[in-house]
Image (tube, rainbow, N blue to C red):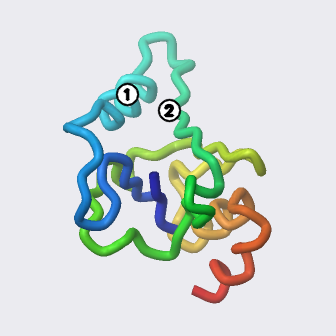
Amino acid sequence: YEMDLTGQCASDSYGDTIYTGVGGILDYIRAASLAADGKGKPIIAMCSRNHEGKSTIVPYLTRGSSVTATRAHVHYVVTEYGIAYLFGKNLRQRAHALIQIAHPDVRESLEKA
């Protein structure tokens, strides 16, 4: 799983390697945001690092990765370091919010990216 600083998600592939079939992340996000009671919260929960110890919040998606949830659809992102609310924010605000919930060891490098 990978998310760039604009909020785009790649969850079914990493680079040119596909790990899953077509998933339902976009359906889930759209359904949650359109909940009939108005209380739907589309939340993407992820670890700040993957199983290889690499940051899952990156300046740009790995070349070849496919976007499974566009930045226009992502509302909330949660890691073990907090919650970022991205909906309606500009690109600079999105990047700042995501850096705040990234692993502390990579925050400085993300700020410089």
Q: Which secondary structure, mark 1? A: helix
For label 2, count other residues whose C-alpha is less than 10 Å away and answer few (under 14), some (14-19) or many (20+). Answer: many
Quick one: SS at disc 2? loop
Residue sitting at 69 percent across and 61 percent down? 102
13, 107: nearer the viewer: 13
Residues at circles 2 and 1 in contact by the CB criterion of under 8 Å: yes
Q: Which residue is mark 1?
A: 28
Decide which of tag 2 and tag 1 comes sooner along the chain.
1
Q: Is residue 73 left or right of residue 68?
A: right
Give coordinates of residue 109: x percent, y percent.
67, 83
Question: Amino acid type of disc 2?
Answer: Pro
Q: How far across and how far down the image is residue 73, in percent?
A: 39, 45
Q: Nearer the viewer, residue 49 or 69?
A: 49
Q: Position of residue 90 (x, y in %)?
A: 52, 66
Residue type, label 1: Tyr
Q: Which mark is residue 47?
A: none
Q: Residue 42 bears which disc, if any? A: 2
Image x and y of residue 69, in percent: 35, 47
Determine whether 34 is above or below 5 in the image: above
- Label 1 neighbour load within 10 Å: few <14, some 14-19, many 20+: some
- Give the residue drawn at x 24%, y 69%: 64
- Quarter of the figure with residue 53: bottom right
For this orientation, the residue located farthest to the top is: 37
On screen, residue 76 above or below 59: above
Quarter of the image that includes the C terminus: bottom right
